[in-house]
Amino acid sequence: MRDFSNELEADFQEFFRVDLLDLWRGRLSLRRVHVLMQSLLKKPGRSTFLAAVDESAAWSVTDHLIARVSDAVEVSNYLFIKANSDAESLEIPEPVPRPGQAPAPPSSEPQFAGGDELSAFFTHMNNL
């Protein structure tokens, strides 16, 4: 409470219309503060208190899913272009940066299987 009092006060006002100063005025119990804080921890992407405690919670689940879909579409487009053109200088797309996560290290160029490897793989799969 001491470290994130500003965020806690703002969220109490926004979500519950409760003044945190009521704790010192004797109109709010510690139990009630605990219950309200637990409720704030279940509001990712909306609670400033939760975002201060856990930076990755600044985004909601929907935001994380949209970023995941965006990354998948970018990789899909990259693979489609790579398979259907002679573009040698095409770079692997960078994932959408997410809050609370360190940037991904630069990845090396993927190694694609040759015809012999593919043939051996499918032969092996066919024999299972």
Image: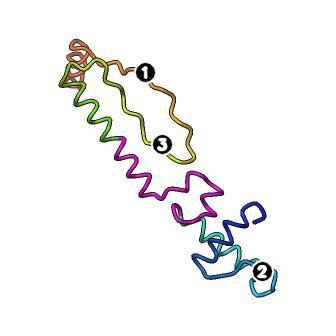
- The answer to which image quadrant residue 57 occupies is bottom right
Give the left or right position of residue 107, taking residue 8 as reference. left
Mark 3 or mark 1, which has the lower sequence index?
A: 3
Q: On residue 97, which mark appears?
A: 3
Residues in magenta, as a range:
44-71
- At 61% from the left and 82% from the top, the residue drawn is 17
In which quadrant is the C terminus drawn? top left
Mark 3 or mark 2, which has the lower sequence index?
A: 2
Q: On residue 123, which mark appears?
A: none
- At 80% from the left and 86% from the top, the residue drawn is 26
Q: Residue 121 colored magenta?
A: no
For disc 2, the marked residue is 23
> Which colour style is shown?
rainbow
Give the left or right position of residue 2, taking residue 7 as reference. right
Number of the front mark, 3 or 1: 3
Q: Nearer the viewer, residue 94 or 42?
A: 94
Q: CA distance from mark 3 to mark 1?
A: 18 Å
Mark 1 or mark 2, which has the lower sequence index?
A: 2
Q: On residue 108, which mark appears?
A: 1
Give the left or right position of residue 47, taking residue 30 as reference. left
